[in-house]
Image (tube, rainbow, N blue to C red):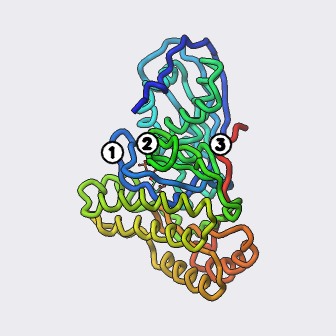
């Protein structure tokens, strides 16, 4: 794998003090990434809708140090307050990227971050959080090196974001991104996400995702631990093969607009992800009774109304309700009247597909 393309070779300009602010969204996988090897290499290709309203805004103030040390020096302010518990993941991120961004040693960084979604809503913020930091680093690199192409910036930002959190590699661009080398997706790579390379059927334009907040608490098992449990998992190899096959099927569906097949693949992926958790050792269950209640009600509604509503899950109890924009009015009524009562404090987040990172 050609990682040399991401090394910084030319002499760097000297900049004393500079700040950048980026807003990057979360994403929701349709074919799931679950299982990886070092360094952050996925066991199968995954594909996601980039979201829009669920995002992180991050500003990094870079101040040149008097003397360069071999220590990465940063402060982390989250929603106005220092957040020591987020530091280790970011520290590990800086360690992983240091060869590709040697300039991080030259600066003291003040990272100020906030999420658009409520704090501890159970929505993973690592995808939006790490991709925002990656974009700020690329903005700095663009000043230091000058004349980086937009294409290179996007690719390297995704490459760096991946090293922080795999799914973050899919949050730089939108509305549909593939991460992981796949023979049928031209340009795809284990190293970074790429935009879905084919024309997408209009039914998927501005596709809706209403995130039902079933459980806002901290997950009992982190994604990182969950990925680890795919080593020696009895069904791992079959699962990785299935995901790559589902990606081919989904690629066809995204082009031809067959929503019946879309629903079948997406829901099967969600349940398979959770089946992998239930069949690992140690085993665990992240769904809650209300997750199942909601799924059953979505199935009934779909049947009774000839609707194209469906669900997917990430590594938690919350339910992502997916549907075409044309059904929005009716389905929002259904969510308000029937599903919201299964959410904590009736909370849900209305989102839709979006275009990725945005500089502020
Ligand atoms: C279930 O990207 O959070 O959401 O690479 O360890 O940070 P790390 O894991 P992470 O895993 C995401 C898992 C998932 C599926 C997906 O987004 O594809």
Element marked by disc 1: strand
Identify the residue at horizontal 45%, vertical 62% (top origin): 246
Q: Is residue 298 left or right of 239 when viewed as pictured?
A: right
How far across and how far down the image is residue 260, in percent?
57, 74
Q: Earlier in the sequence, mark 2 or mark 3?
A: 2
Q: Earlier in the sequence, mark 3 or mark 1?
A: 1
In this figure, which residue is indicated by the disc labeled 2? 190
Identify the residue at horizontal 59%, vertical 47% (top origin): 197
Task: Work out whether 71 lies above or below 93.
Answer: above
The reply to whether the C-beta atoms of the residues labelled 2 and 1 are less than 8 Å apart is no
The reply to whether the C-beta atoms of the residues labelled 2 and 3 are less than 8 Å apart is no
Q: How many marks?
A: 3
How far across and how far down the image is residue 297, in percent?
56, 83
Q: Nearer the viewer, mark 2 or mark 1?
A: 2
Position of the N terminus by quadrant: top left
Label 2 crowding class (10 Å Cα cut-off): few <14, some 14-19, many 20+?
A: many
Q: Tell me the CA gap for discs 3 and 1.
A: 27 Å
Element marked by disc 3: loop
Label 3 crowding class (10 Å Cα cut-off): few <14, some 14-19, many 20+?
A: many
How far across and how far down the image is residue 136, in percent?
61, 32
In this figure, which residue is indicated by the disc labeled 1? 37
Position of the C terminus by quadrant: top right
Q: Is residue 160 left or right of 149 when viewed as pictured?
A: left
Q: Earlier in the sequence, mark 2 or mark 1?
A: 1
Using the image as rendered, state which of residue 195 and residue 200 is in the foreground.
200
Q: Is residue 7 left or right of 283 when viewed as pictured?
A: right
In this figure, which residue is indicated by the disc labeled 3? 357
Q: Tell me the CA gap for discs 2 and 1.
A: 11 Å
């Amino acid at each position: 794998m050609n990682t040399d393309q991401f090394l910084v070779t030319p002499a760097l300009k000297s900049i004393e003090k500079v700040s950048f602010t980026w807003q990057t969204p979360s994403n929701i996988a349709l074919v799931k990434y679950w299982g990886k090897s070092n360094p952050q290499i996925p066991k199968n290709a995954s594909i996601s809708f980039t979201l829009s309203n669920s995002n992180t805004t991050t500003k990094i103030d870079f101040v040149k140090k008097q003397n360069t040390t071999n220590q990465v020096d940063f402060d982390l302010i989250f929603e106005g307050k220092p957040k020591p518990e987020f530091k280790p993941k970011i520290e590990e991120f800086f360690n992983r990227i240091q060869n590709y961004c040697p300039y991080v040693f030259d600066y003291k960084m003040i990272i100020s971050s906030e999420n658009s979604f409520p704090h501890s809503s159970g929505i993973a913020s690592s995808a939006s959080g790490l991709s925002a930091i990656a974009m700020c680093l690329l903005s700095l690199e663009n000043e230091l090196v000058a004349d980086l192409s937009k294409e290179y910036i996007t690719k390297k930002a995704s490459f760096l974001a991946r090293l922080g959190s795999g799914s973050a590699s899919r949050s730089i661009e939108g509305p549909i991104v593939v991460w992981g080398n796949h023979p049928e997706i031209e340009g795809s790579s284990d190293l970074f996400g790429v935009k879905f390379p084919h024309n997408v059927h209009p039914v998927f334009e501005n596709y809706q995702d209403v995130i039902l907040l079933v459980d806002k608490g901290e997950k009992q098992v982190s994604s990182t631990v969950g990925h680890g449990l795919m080593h020696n998992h009895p069904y791992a190899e079959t699962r990785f093969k299935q995901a790559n096959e589902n990606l081919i099927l989904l690629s066809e569906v995204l082009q031809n607009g067959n929503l019946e097949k879309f629903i079948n693949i997406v829901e099967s992926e969600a349940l398979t992800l959770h089946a992998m958790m239930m069949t690992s050792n140690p085993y665990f269950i992240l769904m809650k009774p209300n997750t199942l209640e909601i799924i059953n009600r979505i199935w009934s509604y779909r049947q009774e109304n000839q609707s194209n509503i469906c669900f997917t899950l990430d590594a938690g109890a919350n339910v992502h309700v997916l549907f075409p924009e044309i059904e929005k009015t009716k389905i929002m009524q259904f969510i308000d009247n029937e599903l919201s009562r299964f959410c904590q404090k009736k909370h849900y987040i209305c989102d839709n597909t979006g275009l990725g990172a945005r500089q502020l």
